[in-house]
Image (spheres, helix red, strand yellow):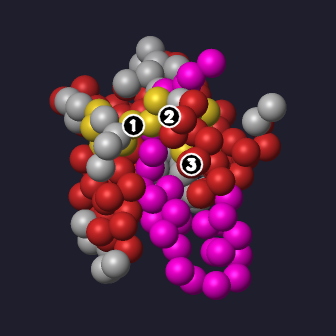
Amino acid sequence: MSQLIYIETSIPSFYHETRAGQFQTMREWTREWWDIARLRDELVTSDAVVLELRHAPEPKRSEALALLATLPILDDVERVDEIVAVYFQHKLMPRDAEGDARHLALATFHGCDILATWNCRHIANANKREHIETVNSSIGYTTPVLTTPYELLERLP
């Protein structure tokens, strides 16, 4: 069954990771998951991701943007700004993590099944899950599964 998956900035970034050590392992997990998900699921992204990637150094910038070039871009409507404000009001994200709050708000507003990310500090953080779900529920939304490519690989049949 196809799922709607929001691709956050860290996914194309790690897909083209060049650092050694654990980063190479994360790159391999990202690539393995991507190769399966792009054929099976509906992958989407946002202008917020594109904007963040435009600040990456070359050649990662061009490679990451090329990876996303065929993905649909979700509309960033006024309601998304309102959801971001609610997240800040409820301290789901620090104000300096406006991009992270926007990614979560976009995926939530558009009814994504999954938000794929390597950002385990602000997004795929088990310690924040219940708080995120409570706030989203209070404003009438279901929270997407917030997870990493590694965890998604573990779920494959």
Q: Are marks 1 and 2 in contact (CB under 8 Å)?
A: yes
Answer few, some or many: residues within 10 Å of disc 3's Cα (few below 14, many 20 plus, some between 14 and 19).
some
113 and 34: which one is in front? 34
* Type of amino acid at the residue the image marks with label 1: Val
Image position, residue 107 (x, y; %): 42, 33
Reading the image, the residue beneath label 1 is 44
Q: Amino acid at mark 2?
A: Ile
Mark 3 / mark 2, whichever is N-terminal: 2
**Residue depicted at 65% across the width and 75% down the height:** 24
Is 78 left, or right, of 107 in this rendering? Answer: left
Q: Earlier in the sequence, mark 1 or mark 3?
A: 3
Picture coordinates of residue 4 (x, y %)?
Answer: 49, 27
Query: Marks 1/2: CA distance?
Result: 6 Å
Q: State the quadrant of the C terminus.
A: top right
Residue 5, which numbered label? 2
Residue 75 found in image quarter: top left
Name the disc covering residue 34, or none.
Answer: 3
Identify the element where label 3 is drawn: helix
Indicate whether 52 appears above or below 152.
Answer: below
Q: Which residues are magenta?
A: 1-29
Task: Identify the mark nearer the N-term, 1 or 2.
Answer: 2
Q: Nearer the viewer, mark 3 or mark 2?
A: 3
Give how far across and how far down residue 62 sits, in percent.
29, 69
